[in-house]
């Protein structure tokens, strides 16, 4: 497995993030809010999970993938609920912008090549709007705001942290995490570099967003990028309970066939939960 052991000193943080409190079940769906419009377009609908206590607390802006924030029945996706409960239970504000729904798009966009919010444009603006909004709150630690994303949201993370530094005095992400992002564009262009520490987690068997371009990206920026790969794991390996299956008709896949595997890998999921906890704890100051 392409990673190093988690330091023992961070065991407490790992334990906090590794268990979801049953007492927070009532907050599982999150609280709806609106983030003021940024440079990318309309005001953003978002879901917020609050940590316990008065704060100020660190925060995580979490970006959904191309399937959107909600499942086919209109419920918050199981993976997003799971991570939101873990993170808020560990003391973080969690904000999940709805990039597609805020622009009138319903349901999954994974089969659409022309999306209303693109990882290289509108969704970067969404991440920045959420950052600026949180940085202005008294109950949020301005210097400890993190960016996290899955798949298309992970690709947005690469684009958001790979851009030039923000203006002096403007808030920025303390660090970032990308689950199975599409790294091909950045790897092929060359010259990409992250302005903050970045953790990339991806399955070696991922045929939706392959790991190899991410290896090249990490090799080009070893001081900032930590790449963790999981043998035999597919896309969505961190989902709490998704049977491995093939999805067809996708707009973008590694092979160009439009078909890719997706599903939970219990060992990879467990390691990722522990690794994310350690990474955040190491950077929250």
Image (cartoon, rainbow, N blue to C red):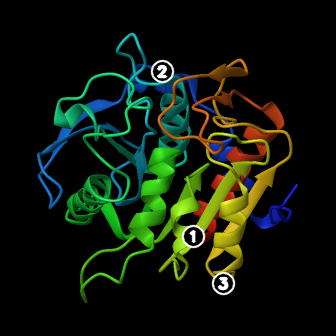
Residue ID for mark 3: 223
For the N terminus, the image quarter is: bottom right
Residue 230 is labelled as none
- N-terminal of the pair, mark 2 or mark 1, is 2
- Contact, mark 2 vs mark 1 (Cβ under 8 Å): no
Local crowd size for mark 3, using a 10 Å CA cut-off: few (<14), some (14–19), many (≥20): few
- Element type at marker 3? loop
Query: Horizontally, is 96 left or right of 254 in the view?
Result: left
Q: Give the residue furthest to the bottom.
A: 168
Residue ID for mark 2: 25
- In this picture, is 191 found above or below 261? below
- Element type at marker 2? helix
In this view, the residue in front, 129 or 245, is 245
Q: Give the residue furthest to the front.
A: 257
Residue ID for mark 1: 188
Identify the residue shown where x is 73% and y is 38%: 269
Identify the residue shown where x is 66% and y is 80%: 220
**Quarter where residue 10 is shown:** bottom right
């Amino acid at each position: 497995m392409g990673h190093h052991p988690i330091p023992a000193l961070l065991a407490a943080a790992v334990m906090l993030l590794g268990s979801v409190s049953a007492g927070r079940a009532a907050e599982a769906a999150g609280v709806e809010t609106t983030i003021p419009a940024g440079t990318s377009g309309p005001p953003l609908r978002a879901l917020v999970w609050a940590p316990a206590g008065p704060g100020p607390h660190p925060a995580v802006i979490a970006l959904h993938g191309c399937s959107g924030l909600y499942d086919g029945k209109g419920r918050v996706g199981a993976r997003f609920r799971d991570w939101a409960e873990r993170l808020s239970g560990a003391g973080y504000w969690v904000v999940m912008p709805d990039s597609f729904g805020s622009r009138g798009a319903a349901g999954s966009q994974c089969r659409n090549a022309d999306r209303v919010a693109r990882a290289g444009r509108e969704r970067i603006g969404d991440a920045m709007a959420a950052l600026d909004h949180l940085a202005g709150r008294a109950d949020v630690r301005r210097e400890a705001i993190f960016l996290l994303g899955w798949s298309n949201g992970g690709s947005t993370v690469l684009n958001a942290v790979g851009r030039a530094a923000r203006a002096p005095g403007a808030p920025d992400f303390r660090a970032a995490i990308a689950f199975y992002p599409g790294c091909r564009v950045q790897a092929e262009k060359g010259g990409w570099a992250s302005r903050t520490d970045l953790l990339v987690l991806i399955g070696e068997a991922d045929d939706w967003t392959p790991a190899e371009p991410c290896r090249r990206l990490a090799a080009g920026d070893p001081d900032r990028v930590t790449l963790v790969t999981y043998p035999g794991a597919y896309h969505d390996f961190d989902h709490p309970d998704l049977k491995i299956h093939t999805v067809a008709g996708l707009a973008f896949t590694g092979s160009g066939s439009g078909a890719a595997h997706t599903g939970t890998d219990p060992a990879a999921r467990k390691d990722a939960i522990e690794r994310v906890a350690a990474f955040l704890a190491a950077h929250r100051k």
